Amino acid sequence: MPGGFGTMDELFETLTLVQTKTITRFPIVLFGKEYYNPLLEAIQEMEKQDTISPGDMNLVLVTDSIDEAMDHITNYISTYYKVRPRKRHWWLFEKR
């Protein structure tokens, strides 16, 4: 979602962690194409100047579609993670 310094910090920190393989298989979605367009242009300039690798932005989905964002995240989860059902607890009044 559109944001300020904190959002930019989290975006670039996450990109750096994925790029350096400190974390792997982590979906990154920017929601709001018009808002992020100036940033994307600056990133394209970085690529032209060889300060980032070509294809680094393939790590990011930029969209205006909630469905596209959710599909992207769902596909990441189903491809890279095994989701196990959580054990239900009687003291939380959960049915078995």
Image: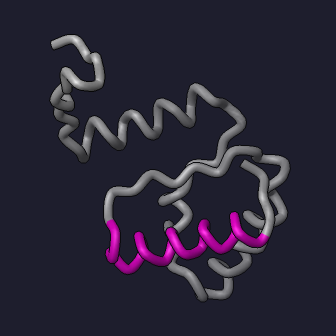
Percent position of residue 14, x then y: 50, 69
* In the depicted structure, whether residue 11 falls above or below residue 34: below
Return the residue found at the far top: 95
> Where residue 83 appears, x then y in whole percent?
22, 36
Q: How is the image coloured?
A: one colour
Identify the residue at image location x=83%, y=52%.
Answer: 35
Labels in figure, total: 0
Most foreground residue, 92 or 53: 92
Residue 84 in the figure: left or right of residue 42: left
The boundaries of the magenta stretch are 5-23
Q: Residue furthest front?
A: 91
Q: Quadrant of residue 6?
A: bottom right
* Residue 36 percent location from the top left of the image: 78, 56
19 or 49, which lies in front? 19
- Residue at 16% from the left image edge and 29% from the top image edge: 87
Q: Is residue 33 left or right of residue 68?
A: right
Q: Is residue 78 above or below residue 20?
A: above
